[in-house]
Amino acid sequence: MHHQRRHRLKSWPDLWFGDAPPKHVVVKMQHLGDQTLALDRPPAAPAAADLTARLSDELLLRILAALPDHLRGPSSLVSKRWLRLAGRLRRSLTLLEWRFLHRRLALRFPDLTDLDLVPASFSSSSASTSAAVLNRGPVSVPVEPHADPPIGYRRFLPPDAIDRGLDAVARSFPGLRKLSVAAPIDSQSGLIAVADGCPTLQELELHRCTDLGLRPISAFNNLQILRLVGSVEGFYAGPGVTDIGLTILAHGCKRLVKLELAGCEGSYDGISAIGRCCAMLEELTISDHRMDAGWLAGLSFCANLKTLRLVGCRRIDTDPGPIEHLGSCAAIERLQMQRCQLRDRRSLHALFVVCEAVREIVFENCWGLDNEMFSSASICRRVKLLSLEGCSLLTTEVSPALSSLFSDLKELKWRPDTKSLLAMSLAGTGMGKKGGRFFKRRIMPGQQRLKGKAEEDSSK
């Protein structure tokens, strides 16, 4: 007689583990009042050997330097050694927090040659958690919602704090070539320390610059490029730079090749002093100037000036004086005007007289430049390149006259603004005019009945 095998229902643990426990799992029973089920973690896999450990730092630096720019950042996450070596490849940096300058900047990036300290020079509240950022040209600062007002003129760090930071820069980066910083008011020790500790510095950008703040400028023996920012509208306003500061600059930086004056004051005396003393000056940029009347005549003393650039100027010169006293820049080659208001024909004519020998003229997004104003450029007979971009008041009536205005013209670039391009593309299509003349209103049946009833009532 065969006995039937009775199948016992499996309990939940049997369903989980079956007959044999799974690999890397150990069941332990501990009697601590209640029975507890504990599962041990599987043993960790052995760490892979660092195949680059035998490579020297110099060889690994050459390998990392060959990587594309977008891969250098992720490569620094491989190990601490790669992070340290990737920092040695960094040459340019914009600092956002001033405290980082004293603690870790030199250890993290020891070979910097271009350092921008302007965003970190603004004082900020430690309680500010806003992620909003206010941009104005090259300057970018966070918006503080608890400030009064949150957007507007900002305060800088105390002068002694800026001086201590510049001392740290001078000690840590002897090979620095470009520096952007807010000039400390009534203090010169920080800039003097940078001039002594960074002998190869060639480019300097000073914000909130004043006349007295330019005294240490003569200590920079190899300075060739200088940018002075007196004030930035909406960000900060300061005493500014006047003829006194421009004269100090002229006598202290005689090897300047490029100079930019942004938000600075001055007059004929300051510009002429720069022309007399800075004999190597080849490029002059004037942005949003506050110059007094008559400053244009001082440009004639810049004997080797090749490029004159006006950016964001609300006016050129309110009173340039008699034409016979203006003079001219004999070596001038390029005249560029960007986002300027050209509403005074007399001042624009005086500018063309000073730049009579120019070979390239560029107008970019300038307001007020119409056909009559542009006709003043007929003085410049040597122009070979003419670029007109975003000047909506200029029309095609100028084109036939170009051959008579510029006899040596070889290249013409004309890019009207978006509004002008749209008007030209819609010409002859009947669009862009009043819609009532070209689009008939569709009247629904219900509206037609109401209209008819209204007419009957009015006839009665």
Image: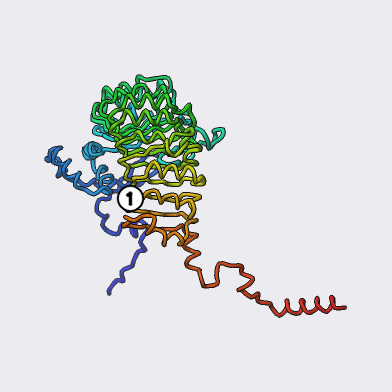
Local packing at callout 1 (Cα closer than 10 Å; few below 14, some 14-19, many 20+) is: some
Is residue 132 at least partly visible in the picture?
A: no
Residue plotted at (27% across, 73% down): 2
Q: Image quadrant for the C terminus?
A: bottom right
Measuring 71% from the left and 80% from the top, which residue is drawn there? 445
Circle 1 sits in a helix, a strand or a loop, which is it? Answer: loop
**Residue farthest to the front, as pictured:** 324
Colour mode of the rendering: rainbow
For the N terminus, the image quarter is bottom left
The residue at which mark 1 appears reads as 382
Of 364 and 355, nearer the camera is 355
User: Would residue 66 be seen by someone viewing this image from the given angle?
Assistant: yes
Q: In terms of depth relative to the viewer, which is nearer, 37 or 216? A: 216
**Could you tell me how many numbered marks the image carries?**
1
Residue 273 image offset from top left, x and y in percent = 37, 28
Q: Is residue 260 left or right of residue 152?
A: left
Q: Position of residue 6 (x, y in %)?
A: 33, 67
Q: Amino acid at mark 1?
A: Arg
Left or right of 454 in this view: 159:
left
Looking at this view, is 180 or 311 the one in front?
311
The answer to which image quadrant residue 412 occupies is: bottom left
| Horizontal arrangement in the rendering, residue 37 relative to residue 20 (left or right) | right
Residue 292 in percent (x, y) is at 48, 32
Q: Splitting the image into 4 quarters, where does residue 356 fall?
A: top left
Residue 171 pos. (x, y %): 27, 24
Where residue 457 sits, quadrant-wise, is bottom right
Is 455 in front, or is 436?
436
Give the left or right position of residue 11, taking residue 69 as reference: right
| Above/below status of 23 relative to 262 | below
